[in-house]
Image: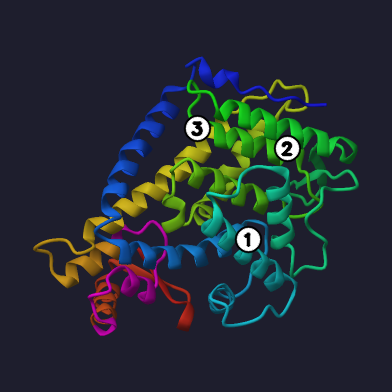
Amino acid sequence: MRYFDYSFLEHGMLPAGLVNVVSAIAELRERENSLKENYAEVFTRLESIAKVQSVKGSNEIEGIVTSEQRINDIVNQNAAPLNHNEAEIAGYRDALALVHADFTALDVRERDILRLHEIMLSYSAIPGGRYKDSDNVIMEASADGARRVRFSPTPASETAETMEQLILAYMDARGSYAINRLLLIPCFALDFLCIHPFADGNGRMSRLLSLLLLYKSGFDAGRYISFEEQINRSKAAYYQSLKDSSVRWRSSENTYFPFMENFVTTLLMCYKELDKRFAVVNAAKVSKRQRIEQTVLNSLLPISKREVCYILPDVSPTTVEAVLASMLKSGEIIKVGTARNTKYVKR
């Protein structure tokens, strides 16, 4: 059975690039915290947007998709799920809502992990809230369509005990003042993914647990700028880092660094995106037109008219629409999607 040892995080032998990213996150986190008191309404609006993007992004990574309008309706509870994909989306919505509402009370205890999994699959025909009862494998397909086993996770017979060891190792390491909590979280997420403790939903659960642990450790940018959507936009790099860090995992000879670097870089992108949003919110001596332009041009993700209005509540939808039309005409931005699903992104 696999055992877990995170003491390597105490020794200071970390790649320089990883240390630099963590330092940049710390600086931006301080800036974010200083803004919260003065811009509570904007943070609330950003959280509303991020919830939709998180539900969409985390499910889309796994190939679970529906239209933009249906995502919005389901997340905002204006519509019931109509098919399997939408049932999975509704379940993730509810599990994410619990993480947002109760992250201080939740932890990586077995009962909380199983509860989140049960909620996530509550609309699905697949039963949730219990570990797998048969062995599973992680497959990959080559360019010619041939399939092969990429990774064999922990056998079902060892899953409960291995999860207990993972949880205890994480709790023990989290209590050490010599270990950076932010760097510990991706180590836990990687090991969770390699155990693959459930018959279904392991990837989505890893992202829910990552958010939970980030929030508990004071890193909440993912609440306002979707962490899952950032992963989705760089999905190939995410899967490559997972692959690189899982090599020789069963024999405890793997390296966590590729996955750690991808994880903290993704989080840094969230903090940078959040910082850019506030660079134009209520900025002094800047016209409404300039603020709209900078909101769109600074966004790392395609952004809708509705989202711009949420970020800039003092600017009328008519003004936003006029500026977007002007930017399209000048070629600064391009349109993605149609009708209600229309978004805009820098050319």
The quarter of the picture where residue 60 lies is bottom right
Q: Is residue 68 left or right of residue 192?
A: left
Disc 3 crowd, CA 10 A, few/some/many (<14, 14-19, 20+): many
Residue 20 against residue 65 in the figure, above or below: above
Q: In the image, which is nearer the foreground, mark 2 or mark 1?
A: 1
x 48%, y 77%: residue: 341
Q: Quadrant of the N terminus?
A: top right
Residue 99 vs residue 126, the one in the foreground? 99
Residue 200 is situated, as x and y percent measured from the top left of the image, at: 78, 54
For badge 2, the amino acid type reads: Cys
Residue 210 vs residue 36, the one in the foreground? 36
Q: Which mark is residue 181?
A: 3
Q: In the image, which is nearer the foreground, mark 3 or mark 2?
A: 3
On the question of residue 152 being in view, the answer is no
Residue 250 against residue 196 in the figure, above or below: above
Residue 224 vs residue 258, the one in the foreground? 224
Quickly name the residue at label 1.
Answer: 95
Q: Are marks 3 and 2 in contact (CB under 8 Å)?
A: no
Outermost residue, front side = 105
Residue 157 against residue 315 in the figure, above or below: above
Q: CA distance from mark 2 to mark 1?
A: 22 Å
- For the record, the magenta segment spans 297-318
Q: Earlier in the sequence, mark 3 or mark 2?
A: 3
Q: Which mark is residue 194?
A: 2
Disc 1 crowd, CA 10 A, few/some/many (<14, 14-19, 20+): many
Q: CA distance from mark 3 to mark 2?
A: 20 Å
